[in-house]
Image (spheres, rainbow, N blue to C red):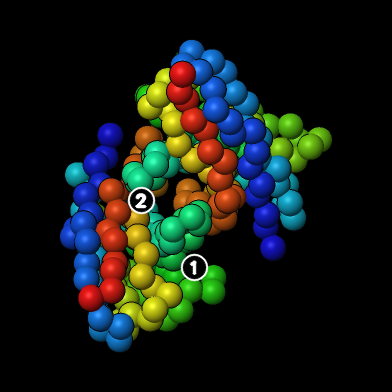
Amino acid sequence: EIVMTQSPATLSVSPGERATLSCRASQSVSGTLAWYQQKPGQPPRLLIYGASTRATGIPARFSGSGSGTEFTLTISSLQSEDFAVYYCQQYTNWPRTFGQGTKVEIK
Amino acid sequence: EVQLLESGGDLVQPGGSLRLSCAASRFTISNYAMNWVRQAPGKGLEWVSTLTSGANTYYADSVKGRFTVSRDTSKNTLYLQMNSLRAEDTAVYYCAKISNSGWYEDYWGQGTLVTVSS
């Protein structure tokens, strides 16, 4: 099983600032990495797939990078609606595995 | 817009059974792979099962032998039959559509809550 590890667990950021979230895979997943955003009481929403491709309707302030085992989600200028939990997921191997999540909170 | 509507969640005793449904709209489920993903209260996301368009099935080790995924194409509905339920199966269960361009979930339902408790 590929273990996905996200850091930090919690990120305190002021509105308008940049947020950088990390995701590490225990073995290479090439570019088969997705990022999801989840707000309380809501299902996850796809942000990024293929490590760096924004999903339909996702603002340009969200960007993904990385390949192999190291990945990054960057939110260039945090808006109030971006405070949420973010998960990475690998979809190269079974079982599909998610990171434990990074909570982005208001500083 | 794609819609997924889960139902069937309930309070059930340990050892009991439950069947979840996921009714899909505006796309044909047999043309796509579909996932079940769960989230225990206050916890992260856990993949549970996949049913491919070719009817292949995959399960997490934690549910293998107890859960069965299936679909009814006439109803355009995905199912998850859950047997021998345990307290650790307590979670919100989401169904999700898998994209045709990669094995990631591009649409999610709102989820249905399963509580296993005596």
Q: Which mark is residue A89?
A: 2
Q: Nearer the viewer, residue B101 or B115?
A: B115
Residue at left offset 22%, top offset 61%? A10
Front-most of residues B97 and A82: A82
Asked whether A86 or A23 is in front, the reply is: A86
| Residue B117 percent across, percent down from the top left | 45, 23
| Amino acid beneath label 1 | Ala
Evaluate if marks 1 and 2 touch, with contact meaning CB atoms under 8 Å apart.
Answer: no
Mark yes or no: residue B68 visible. Answer: no
Q: A42 left or right of B109?
A: left
Is disc 1 placed on a helix, strand or loop? loop
Residue appearing at x 33%, y 55% in the figure: A88
Amino acid type indicated by mark 2 = Gln
Quarter of the image with the N terminus of chain B is bottom right
Letter of the chain that mark 2 sits on in the rendering? A
Classify 10 Å Cα crowding around label 2: few (below 14), some (14-19), many (20 and above). Answer: many
- x, y percent for residue A20: 23, 71
Earlier residue among tags 1 and 2: 1
Seen in the image, is B13 located left or right of residue A1? Answer: right
> Visible in this render: residue A62?
yes
Q: Secondary structure at mark 2?
A: strand
The tag on residue B28 is none
Residue in the image at 50% along x and 18% along y = B13
The residue pinned by badge 1 equals: A55
